[in-house]
Image: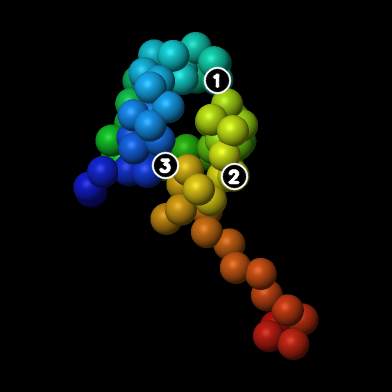
Amino acid sequence: MGTSRLKVILVEKDMSVLELAEKTGLSARSISRFVNGHTTPTINNAYKISDILGLHITKVFPNVFNYKRISRNQI
């Protein structure tokens, strides 16, 4: 599945999977699966991770939570 953005962010922030797991309250196994692209987090877990990393959810999980703003005229 390729390198996830989360993996890159953890390297940039010098944070381990275990550290992120401890800070979010999620299991290291779950974080590892997100990092390696094996599964995608729920919206709640994605927000927990994004908040800890200090980034918007679409920056951490761009292929999962990439919302476009739609005007009423487009509906």
Label 2, label 3: how far apart the Cα atoms are: 16 Å
Residue of label 2: 56
- Which residue is farthest left? 2
Mark 3 belongs to which amino acid? Thr
Mark 2 belongs to which amino acid? His
Residue 69: percent from left, percent from top: 66, 69
Number of numbered tags placed on the structure image:
3
Q: Is residue 45 visible?
A: no
Q: Residues within 10 Å of mark 3 (few under 14, many from 20)?
A: some
Camera-nearest label, 3 or 1: 1
Residue of label 3: 40
User: Callout 2: helix, strand or loop?
Assistant: loop
Q: Are marks 1 and 2 in contact (CB under 8 Å)?
A: no
Residue 49: percent from left, percent from top: 53, 31
- Left or right: where does residue 3 sit relative to residue 40? left
Camera-nearest label, 1 or 2: 2
Q: Is residue 9 visible?
A: yes
| Vertical arrangement, residue 61 with respect to residue 27, above or below | below
Residue pictured at 55% horizontal, 20% vertical: 24
Lower position in the chain sequence, tag 2 or tag 3:
3
User: Callout 3: helix, strand or loop?
Assistant: loop
- Which residue is farthest right? 72
Residue of label 1: 24
Mark 1 belongs to which amino acid? Thr
Camera-nearest label, 2 or 3: 2
- Left or right: where does residue 64 sit relative to residue 38? right
Picture quadrant of residue 35: top left
Label 3, label 1: how far apart the Cα atoms are: 15 Å
